[in-house]
Amino acid sequence: MKAENLIRAASGTRVRHLVYISVVGADRVPVKSGIDRAMFGYFASKRAAEQIVINSGLPWTILRATQFHDLLLTVAQAMMKMPIMPVFAGFRFQPVDSSEVAARLVELTLGDPAGLVSDLGGPRIDKMSDLMRTYLRAQGKRRLILPVWLPGRAARAHRAGANLTPYHTDGKRTWEEFLADHEACHE
Ligand SMILES: NC(=O)c1ccc[n+]([C@@H]2O[C@H](COP(=O)([O-])OP(=O)(O)OC[C@H]3O[C@@H](n4cnc5c(N)ncnc54)[C@H](OP(=O)(O)O)[C@@H]3O)[C@@H](O)[C@H]2O)c1
């Protein structure tokens, strides 16, 4: 695991502070079955990396962020290639701008080791279907949106909001603003 290699390399050096970027829900999305692992193994690997950081013996800070706008854009672009746009039924997201996450990481890195700090979430929580509709509108495209029910405990946890941090809507840039800026850059 990369985190393990990094910490092995850092141990015995003069590293004074490990700062790790994790994901909201790392501790709440259960990854038990094959389908959980196939779809959401990412959450388990982030949790495992968090544990490696915590047990490293080095001073540490961990920030958990919600999904980045860039990730949702990648999903939207891939889904739009299909004549029908599938979305995960009951899923909501709270997309945050990666530049805001990066700025917070810089701030934390320059500060003292702080352990697990407050989550950083985007300014708004929206249904996945609404986020995809906004993307389609911005593109001037139309697609039938098809909700797909995902089985498994990890998906159920997502439907219950395990990937969200409603008390930490600290991100400023909205999905709409991100999409408008992205379009302007690619015209
Ligand atoms: N995307 C999200 O929604 C989200 C949400 C919460 C937290 N996070 C976390 O935030 C971090 C960045 O996410 P991301 O989606 O931006 O990932 P990403 O697009 O895969 O980018 C990862 C970046 O790290 C670099 N990198 C990977 N392994 C490296 C290594 N061994 N040494 C030096 N550089 C290395 C990559 O360089 P190359 O391009 O050269 O490969 C790339 O620039 C990840 O830890 C992710 O788990 C992401």
Image (tube, rainbow, N blue to C red):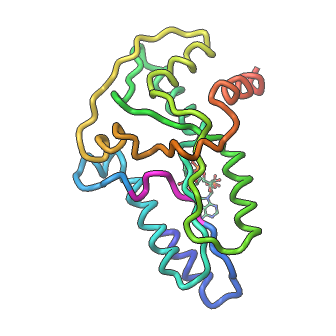
Pick the residue in front: 172 or 23.
Answer: 172
In this picture, residue 52 sits left or right of residue 124: left
The residue range painted magenta reads: 20-27
Q: Is residue 25 magenta?
A: yes
In this picture, residue 94 sits left or right of residue 145: right
In this picture, residue 21 sits left or right of residue 106: left
State the image quarter where residue 95 is shown.
top right
- In the displayed structure, 28 sits above or below 167; it is below
Q: Is residue 40 magenta?
A: no
Question: Residue shown at 38%/59% (left/top)?
Answer: 44
**Which quarter of the frame holds ligand 1?**
bottom right
- In the displayed structure, 108 sits above or below 87; it is below
Q: Position of residue 180 (x, y in %)?
A: 71, 23
State the image quarter where residue 147 is shown.
top left
Pick the residue in front: 89 or 126.
Answer: 126
Question: Residue shown at 43%/52% (left/top)?
Answer: 25
- In the displayed structure, 28 sits above or below 182; it is below
Question: Residue shown at 47%/74% (left/top)?
Answer: 52
- In the displayed structure, 172 sits above or below 2; it is above
Q: Position of residue 173 (x, y in %)?
A: 69, 35
Question: Residue shown at 71%/87% (left/top)?
Answer: 14
Seen from this angle, which residue lies furthest front?
Answer: 167
